[in-house]
């Protein structure tokens, strides 16, 4: 159930996968247009999407890749289930975990540790070494696990984002206990389909594509729709369509903007090729890396080729 | 922590993602060689793999696709992290959910519902309609949620596999409440690398392949290693390698057996192409569908081509 | 040197690879718009092209494939050397050879046989069997060889098209002596670039494409410009560019018209990809076979995809 | 009809496309093993091949690319018509043309010029400028045209190879009158299939491949048989199969030796793919350029991959 948070001064509303104190909140802090907005925390990605579709939130911030808070599949599948949503931005959040506890707790006293299962998996190596006899208590989020320390004695400690101590009167028993020190989570800002973000020269375009069912080589043919136009992919991820095993849709992030000629032609090609292609949006890349299409596929080179085609079609 | 289960008469040991009463148990029931084996339930896929590597279990049954009990990513990433494990078989389990409770409970009295988050997501539509005011209590498995009903009053009901009532004195309040009525979970049997299962004519081969890092078109080139030899893929799934965003490994299931000429040549081609390719095994398909390589790539046609090559290499 | 032929009633001028009595004349007879035109026979393909470029002939009929009169390479290379010429039609002529001689000649008396080298090669099997002691006297065309029988006694017989006896007082000693009974020659009608022939639904488009020089896989990438848009090729023929060995240009005939969306997009793609692409024309196919683009690449499907692209570019 | 030439001291016999004084003779001069051999000049490529097949000649030297003496198509088609012939070497001959005449002739007096049609086409630009009123008398070879100057007064001059004056008492009126100053002709040495030339590290392999008839994309699929194994092509040339228009066979020269692992696997792949593939031989390249397979496809890398495949097939 949505829970309101801090003093909005604009009448924009942002939903985010909560509660406060999770990594999503760190992504939200990077979103300029959310600065003075009203913020609503939700418990599920599907809930965030529902709030946006119903108009109760203008935008939502949800995890999409390598998520600690339960994103990825939930997000990908939720986006595949509607054609009303567009992506408006992406944000990278470095992921590190601290072990937190009620003031006065000593590390040696910790037995039961609450956290989200993914955070637990990331920290398991450290725990097996330092607290081999610990027991894991699963929670819906790292922040919920931490908050519960103050209302119940079920757990002795929680694994959560470093910022959790800004929200709750807890102490940090150990820092950065996750296995992968370079871990990042990628979040996206979503909203209703509306004004397309302007091309910045460093953009990404996201689509979901189903393959024509019974054709071998169909994946190759689909990828050629991009490569023939010089469009590079940054991510391709298959997800079962869900009607039966063995059928997949592909979540694809490609370099460039739908208003780029090469990308536009590639997407139109996909539209003809695929029984179903969903456009999720074109938006500025978090890493600000400039788009360089392969081969001679810049907008200028497309314009030259169009002019030439025009000339031979008139054939004078 | 491993918990022992029912009367083994062989000295084979099978680990499975537990506890008893989950869908994994239904997969385990399909494994002939596990019939009289000792069975150990574990809490994490990683734990199952550790038991196999240490020799404490001969084999393990773990979910790999569309899992309700937390497989997929955990399984894929765990398999990518070792080269000691091979797949020995696959099993399909139809997935359906029942709402269960302590004897005497009425549906109208149910407020707090315990279950694994994936099972919850699958049942959410039904719950919002029938029990709009319910609260979700997350659990590590559907079976754990059900079992806890008998030891604690935190939850009023649990969502679990239909077989759960064989294990616990619970009643079924509602049947088949999941959204997707055709849902299946695919499980695999894993063990240490050892005797390769014999080709049956209806086999699958699983590999994990990393792409040479900075080459666009690398995915296309990788897929051509299969298509040139007429090998069809049944699944391709990308997973972040994890060292940094933007690098992926691909989990691939292909039709055929490593002892088939076409598959052998494709895998050797992948080995040259890729900085890292892990062979996960060749095993009989759950759906018993016969392998038909594309084009003229049967073992007989390979033998003919080899004979011809031999003849021109001698050139007499 | 051009030699004038029969009674023109229009002021159109057609050049053709002569002299009268060759297979080119049979092609010319198929060209409706040449019916009442003035006709000029020329000795070389290059000469025909020069007459068209200079305006002395409106059109020319020249052999392009499997030619008996010295077409193919000469034609392909001549077309590659100019950008002023377009193809306006194609014509198929069945090729058969007769052995002709001065009236009164007997087969057993024939020793020296005049003909074009290609016609000789086609008839050599028959000659070795029936006239094993013959000597070949090369000529610039089959018709020139036949005509010379009446002005010189150098040769006893000539190999020529069946129609040669319409032009010269000669007798036929043997019919259909060529080796390949299904042989055909393909001719084209060329003219200055001007009004593009209208699409008929059964069209061909011809281009000459150079590959970017030092890229392996460049030929594959070039072919993908067609295949991604569902355009089938009916002919691909490499010719050395001629500046040094190892560099080729490709003469390509593809199914469809430059005004078809799929073909237009493929040609614009080639224009970006290739350092040099020459458009030779879109024209009605001699065999009247309807164009069926592979996949969903009809004009209607292109229009749908464009409409969709427009809609997501506006994103409302 | 074969005509014998200079003092052999070995009992090897070499046929060559004659007569003496043509460019083929210059190629023959590069063939070490022909040094002391008996040499037979022939009038047609087909005749050279017949002599080799019948055993009357051990080897033959014939033009294969950019030929002035009438090679190319005749050679390609003749090689496609037999499976008894192999290529044993290739030789490059720079092509330049001189205008030669009987002693005492002045350039200004030249009216009728004899030569092979290809040599004429190459020299036409120069002739139109210097002798605009000339007439062309076609000949079966440049050398035959030159030799005839001494036995007949039909022609005033001939266009021939510079070496022609070594054989005939003629004078040179103008040097290097051909249009393309870098022109080369490529010749091959052919013999019966027998001992395969040893790999030198700078080899070529030649094959003729038919496409499976009615499959669009078949050419792409054929090229992938090479590219997947990292084998580069140096030449691809289509020739009509001849049974009807629209069917082609492809003459392909590829870098490497049939004993190289990558080439062997590519050829075996072609053998499965194609209804007909003819192996023409592996031989040392004229330009001595070392073979570098694309990607990781050296013999050593093939051996590593085979060892790995062996290990996973045993799976211990």
Image (tube, coloured by chain):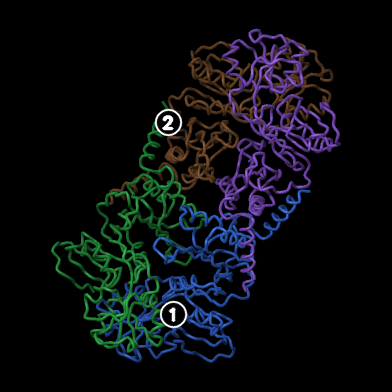
Chain colours: A purple, B brown, C blue, D green
Disc 1 target residue: C44
How many callouts does the rendering have? 2
Mark 2 secondary-structure assignment: helix
The quadrant of the rendering that contains the C terminus of chain D is: top left
Query: Mark 2 = which residue?
Result: D312
Q: Nearer the viewer, residue C36 or A1?
A: A1
* Viewer-proximal residue among D54 and C116: C116
User: Of helix, strand and loop, which one carries label 1?
Assistant: loop
Same chain, labels 1 and 2: no
Could you give the CA–CA distance between mark 1 and mark 2, rounded to whole angstroms?
65 Å
Return the residue nearer the eye: A91 or D52. A91
Query: Extreme left residue here?
Result: D9
Determine the residue positioned at 28% across, 60% down: D190
Which percent across, then down, holds residue C11?
59, 88
Q: Which residue is drawn at 62% across and 74% down?
A: A316
Asked if residue D161 shows in the view, the reply is: yes
Asked which quadrant contains residue A98, the reply is: top right
In this rendered view, identify the residue nearer to me: A253 or D242: A253
**Mark 1 in CB contact with mark 2 (< 8 angstroms):** no
């Amino acid at each position: 159930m949505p829970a309101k948070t801090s003093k909005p001064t604009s009448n924009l509303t942002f939903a985010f996968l909560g509660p406060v104190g999770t990594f999503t909140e760190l992504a939200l802090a990077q979103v300029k247009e959310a600065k003075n907005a009203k913020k609503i925390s939700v418990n599920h990605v599907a809930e965030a999407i529902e709030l946006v579709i119903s108009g109760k939130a203008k935008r939502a911030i949800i995890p999409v890749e390598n998520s600690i808070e339960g994103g990825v599949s939930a997000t990908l599948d939720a986006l595949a289930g509607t054609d009303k949503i567009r992506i408006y931005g992406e944000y990278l959040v470095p992921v590190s975990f601290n072990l937190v506890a009620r003031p006065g707790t000593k590390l040696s006293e910790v037995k039961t540790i609450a956290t989200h299962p993914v955070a637990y998996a990331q920290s398991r190596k450290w725990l097996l070494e330092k607290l081999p006899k610990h027991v894991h208590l699963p929670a819906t989020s790292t922040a919920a696990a931490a908050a519960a320390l103050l209302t119940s004695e079920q757990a002795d400690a929680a694994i959560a984002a470093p910022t959790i101590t800004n929200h709750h009167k807890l102490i940090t028993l150990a820092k950065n206990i996750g296995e992968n020190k370079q871990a990042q989570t990628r979040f996206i800002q979503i909203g209703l389909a509306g004004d397309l973000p302007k091309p910045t020269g460093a953009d990404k375009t996201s689509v979901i594509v189903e393959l024509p069912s019974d054709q071998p080589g169909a994946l190759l043919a689909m990828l050629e729709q991009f490569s023939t136009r010089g469009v590079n992919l940054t991510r391709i991820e298959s997800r079962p369509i869900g009607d039966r095993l063995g059928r997949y849709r592909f979540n694809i992030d490609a370099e460039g903007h739908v208003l780029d000629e090469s990308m536009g032609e590639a997407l139109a090609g996909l539209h003809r090729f695929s029984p179903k292609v969903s456009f999720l949006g074109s938006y500025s890349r978090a890493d600000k890396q400039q788009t360089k299409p392969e081969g001679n596929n810049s907008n200028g080179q497309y314009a030259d080729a169009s002019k030439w085609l025009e000339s031979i079609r008139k054939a004078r």
